Amino acid sequence: MSKKRKSIFVKFLSDSLTFLDAALSIYDELQSGKEPLFSDVRSLEYQKIFNLARSFETLSKAYLSAYGGLIAYPALLVAVAKRGGLLAPRYEQKVINSLGILVRQSLNLKNIKENLSHDPVGKSQIPDLLRSTAKFLRQVREKEIAKLYEQIADYLKQSNKTYIQLLEIRKRIVSAIQLKEVHKQLLDIIEKCLQSESKDEICKNLPREAEKILGVYREKPYLVDQILSMLDLGIQEMFDAMLYTAYLAKAAVIADYSAGRDESDEKYLEEVRDHQKEIIEFMRKIAQINKEFVKSDELDEFMREVEDNAEQGLSGQS
C-alpha cells in the first residue's frame, strides 16, 4: 500500500519543527562549552541562526491564512459594533478583497516558492491587508489599532529591520487595550458563528460584508483550527510570530554561507545572537501546537483535499 502524500500545510509545519530541532541541537552543544570537531564556534552560531530563521519562515508559510484572519477580524468586530459597513463600505470591501488574495496566496505552492521565498510575511499580501484594515479602522474612528497596524506593515516592508524596532512594536501591542479586548471577543464569535449554526444575536446580525469574510473561513474549517490555536496563545504571540519571521528573513538568506557577507551583515547576525534566547523560547511554545497538528492524520487529509481543490481552481484561472 502506497504511503499517502502529506499536505503542503503539514509539510511546512514539519519543516519548521525540523529546522527548530537543528537550531536547538547546535544551541545545546554551544551551551555545553564543547569545542566543535571541525568548524569554529562563530560559524556554528550562524548555522544555528540560519536554522532558527528557516523555522520561522516555514511556520509562517503554513500560517499565512490564519494571520490574515487575525488581522481582519478585529475590524470586523468593530464594524458590527459601530455599523462600520454602513459608514465605510468601500474601505471594508478592500479589506475583504485583500483577505481573499492572501487566502489564495497561502494555497498556491508555486507562488509561495517563487514569490515569497525567505520572507513569506513581508512579500505576501499581509502588509497590504494591514494597511487596508488600518484605513477602514480610521473610518470608524479606531485610531489606536489603525496606527499599530500601519507600524507593523511598515516594519514588515522595510529592508533593514532592527530588534529595537521589533521591541517597540511589541510594547505597543501590549498597551493596545482595545485590540486585546476585541480579540477576546473574537474567539467567542468564531466558535459561535463558524463552528456551529449558532442562533446567537451577534451571529444573526452580522452585516453582509462580514458574512463574506466569515464565508472564506466557514468553507475551510482547517483555517478555523489554526485561528483558534493561535488565539489560545494570545494576540501578542500571534503578532510576535509575524514580526520574528520578518526580522529573521535576512538571516535565512545570509547566515548559511560566510562568503559574500559584509560588515552590516555581521552586525545584524550578532544582534540576532544577542537576542536568541527569547526568540527560541517563543518558538518552543509555538512548536508544541505545531507538533500536534503534524500528528493529526485527519487534519492532514482534509488539508490535502483543500490544496488539491485550490490547485485545480488556480489551473482553471490560468
Image: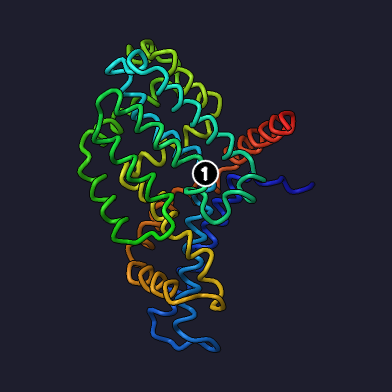
Q: Position of residue 50 (x, y in %)?
A: 50, 67
Q: Is residue 179 left or right of residue 102?
A: left
Closer to us: 139 or 40 = 139
Closer to us: 208 or 203 = 208
Quadrant of the image containing the C terminus: top right
- Against 98, is 30 above or below? below
The residue identified by callout 1 is 124
Q: Is residue 205 left or right of residue 102?
A: left
- Against 152, is 69 above or below? above
Q: Secondary structure at mark 1?
A: loop
Residue drawn 38% across and 68% down?
272
- Against 57, is 187 above or below? above
Total numbered labels placed on residues in the image? 1
Q: Is residue 302 left or right of residue 37?
A: right
Residue drawn 46% across and 23% down?
213
Q: Position of residue 123 (x, y in %)?
A: 52, 48
Quadrant assignment, res 141 = top left
Mark 1: give few (<14), some (14-19) or many (20+) Cα within 10 Å.
Answer: many
Which coloring applies here?
Answer: rainbow
- The kind of residue tagged 1 is Ser
Q: Position of residue 193 (x, y in %)?
A: 41, 20
Tell me if residue 90 can be seen: yes
Give the residue furthest to the right. 1
Tell me if residue 234 can be seen: no
Residue drawn 53% across and 63% down?
19
